[in-house]
Amino acid sequence: MAQLRGIRGVKIPVTDLARSTAWYRDVFGFEPEWEFADEDGVVRGVAGYVGGGVAGLSLRENPEKARAIAGFDPVNWGVATRQDLGEWIAHLDGLGIPHSPEIEASIGWLLVFTDPDGLEIHLYTDESHGVDHGARPGYGRRVGMAG
């Protein structure tokens, strides 16, 4: 079997394509490069990149699926440091987007906010805080380290 090279992209269902495209553009710098029209000629999907090409993103108008995953966090986005997370907080504040406070998560720090359809967006730091939260309910622990 050939080695995987990474994740090519993430596809997110949305209720309103234009609204979500604008939101992901404002928040993540999303720039659609492709659009997908259905048989009726109506564009119901777009694809492009976020973060200057760091990750592929597709948005697909599918209101039923978008409502079904509201409150879920299917993708975790990464930032390098806690300082970077602080810059994201300032960015979201500047856009008027509500968000959690900085959270000391299982390994590093975390910021949580939602897209226009209620999909949870999680930004995690690669930087670790070194605190073992493995015994706390809802926090991760290394596999094989049952407590």
Image (cartoon, rainbow, N blue to C red):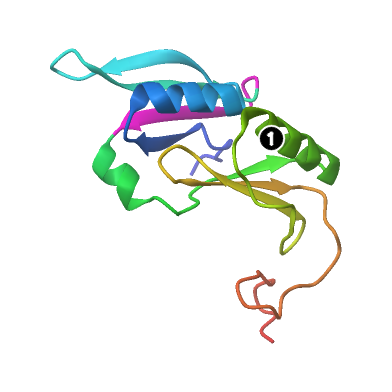
Identify the residue at image location x=65%, y=70%: 139
Q: Residue at x 76, y 42 (%)?
A: 85
Residue 3: tell me if it is visible.
yes
126 shown above or below 55: below
Of residue 14 and residue 141, the one placed in the foreground of this image is 14
Residue 52 x, y percent position in the rendering = 65, 19
x, y percent for residue 64: 25, 44
Left or right side of 88 for 56: left
Is residue 80 at all visible to an observer of this figure? no
Judged from the image, the secondary structure of the residue bearing numbered disc 1 is helix
Residue that lies at the very extreme toward the front in this rendered image: 96
Residue 10 sits inside the magenta stretch:
no
Tell me: 117 left or right of 23.
left
Crowd class of label 1 (few under 14; some 14 to 19; many from 20; radius 10 Å): few
In the image as oriented, which residue stretches furthest toward the bottom?
147
Residue type at the position of mark 1: Asp
Decide which of 88, 132 is in the foreground and name it: 88
Residue 38 placement: quadrant: top left
Q: Residue furthest left?
A: 40
* Quadrant where the image shows the C terminus: bottom right
Q: Main secondary structure of the magenta part?
A: strand
Question: Where does label 1 land, which residue?
Answer: 93
**Residue range highlighted in magenta:** 52-61
Instruction: Say above or below: 1 vs 44.
Output: below
Name the residue located 64 percent from the left edge and 25 percent from the top edge: 51
Q: Position of residue 124 (x, y in %)?
A: 69, 48
How many marks do you count on the picture?
Answer: 1
Coordinates of residue 67 in the picture (x, y in percent): 32, 47
Q: Is residue 15 left or right of residue 145?
A: left
